Every structure is written in structure tokens, then in C-alpha cells.
């Protein structure tokens, strides 16, 4: 995707929420190098979003919490100059990993390094908060 399309973003968030709920209470926690928690759900949701957002050959980049360290400086520079999707696959991984309901899936849309739009979906409560500028 190369532009903010709230109906499509909503569909993706609902799909991501379903994936995350499929792991909820069943996933093991691991520690990343920075000593923060990561789960299988974080990785699965980010992979799903990458299939839609990580398209450098089309001018769209994805900066994801779980994969940004794998990106080189050129990729990040291009993302900051052009269109970038900023995702946190499980926003609130610690509560998620401890079976608490206070977590969501977050998607942000940047142009030229400026965050223009965003949405967060809270699957446990079914709430979705989004901009639609």
C-alpha cells in the first residue's frame, strides 16, 4: 500500500488482531537483545503486515519494531524520505505476554519522515482508534 486507506487498514488490523488472539495465552516469551519481551505473536503479526507494507520497489517501506534492526542505513533513509509504514505488531507486549487485555496492534503512516495517520486496534475489547485525515 502506498497511501492511507482507512477501510483497508481496518481490515488489516482486524486480521492482525485475529492472529494475535490465536496466540493469546499460548505463546512463550523471549527476550530481545535490548532485554524487552518478544512473542511468536509479535513476529507473526509483523510478518503479515510486511507482506502488505514492505514494498521498496513500489516506494513503500515498513519500519517494524521487530525487524528494524535488520534494515540497513540506506533502507531507513529511503523510508524517512518517502512513504513509510511504522508498525508495532503487539503494542503492549508485556501485558499481552502476561494475558492482560491492555494491548493492541498499531499502524502509522509517514510521508517524508512525518507521521500523517495512525490507528490502533485493541482486539480484546474490540475497540479501534484511527485518524482519517
Image (tube, rainbow, N blue to C red):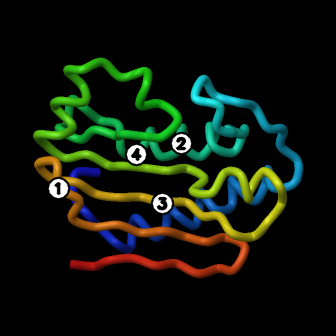
- Determine contact: label 2, label 3, CB under 8 Å: no
Q: Position of residue 69 (x, y in %)?
A: 43, 25
Cα separation between marks 1 and 3: 16 Å
Q: Secondary structure at mark 1?
A: strand
Q: Nearer the viewer, mark 2 or mark 1?
A: 1
Q: Which residue is mark 2?
A: 46
Q: Residue at x 69, y 45 (%)?
A: 41
Quarter of the image with the C terminus is bottom left
Q: Residue at x 54, y 38 (%)?
A: 47
Residue at mark 4: 52
Q: Are marks 1 and 3 in contact (CB under 8 Å)?
A: no
Mark 3 burial class by Cα count in 10 Å: few <14, some 14-19, many 20+: many
Q: Which residue is mark 3?
A: 106
Tell me the distance, in whole angstroms, between the alpha carbons under discs 2 and 3.
10 Å
Query: Label 2 neighbourhood size at 10 Å, few (<14), some (14-19), many (20+)?
Result: many
Q: Position of residue 64 (x, y in %)?
A: 44, 40
SS of the residue at dot 2? Answer: helix
Give the alpha-carbon distance from disc 2 to disc 1, as whole Å.
21 Å
Whether residues under marks 1 and 4 lie with C-beta atoms below 8 angstroms apart, the answer is no
Task: Name the one closer to the observer, 87 or 30.
Answer: 30
Pick the front one: 86 or 59: 86
First in sequence, mark 2 or 1: give its number. 2
Q: Is residue 36 above or below residue 19?
A: above
Point out the tag, 1 or 4, that comes first from the N-terminus: 4
Q: Which of pointers 2 and 3 indicates the residue nearer the eye?
A: 3
Residue 33 located left or right of residue 30: left
Amino acid at each position: 500500500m502506498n497511501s492511507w486507506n482507512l477501510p483497508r487498514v481496518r481490515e488489516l488490523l482486524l486480521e492482525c488482531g485475529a492472529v494475535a488472539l490465536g496466540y493469546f495465552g499460548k505463546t512463550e516469551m523471549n527476550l530481545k537483545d535490548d532485554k524487552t519481551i518478544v512473542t511468536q505473536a509479535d513476529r507473526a503479526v509483523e510478518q503479515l503486515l510486511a507482506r502488505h507494507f514492505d514494498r521498496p520497489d513500489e516506494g513503500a517501506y515498513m519500519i517494524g519494531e521487530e525487524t528494524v534492526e535488520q534494515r540497513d542505513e540506506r533502507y531507513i533513509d529511503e523510508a524517512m524520505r518517502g512513504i513509510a509504514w511504522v508498525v508495532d505488531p503487539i503494542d503492549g507486549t508485556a501485558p499481552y505476554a502476561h494475558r492482560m487485555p491492555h494491548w493492541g496492534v498499531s499502524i502509522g503512516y509517514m510521508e517524508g519522515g512525518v507521521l500523517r495517520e495512525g490507528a490502533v486496534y485493541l482486539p480484546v475489547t474490540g475497540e479501534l482508534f484511527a485518524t482519517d485525515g
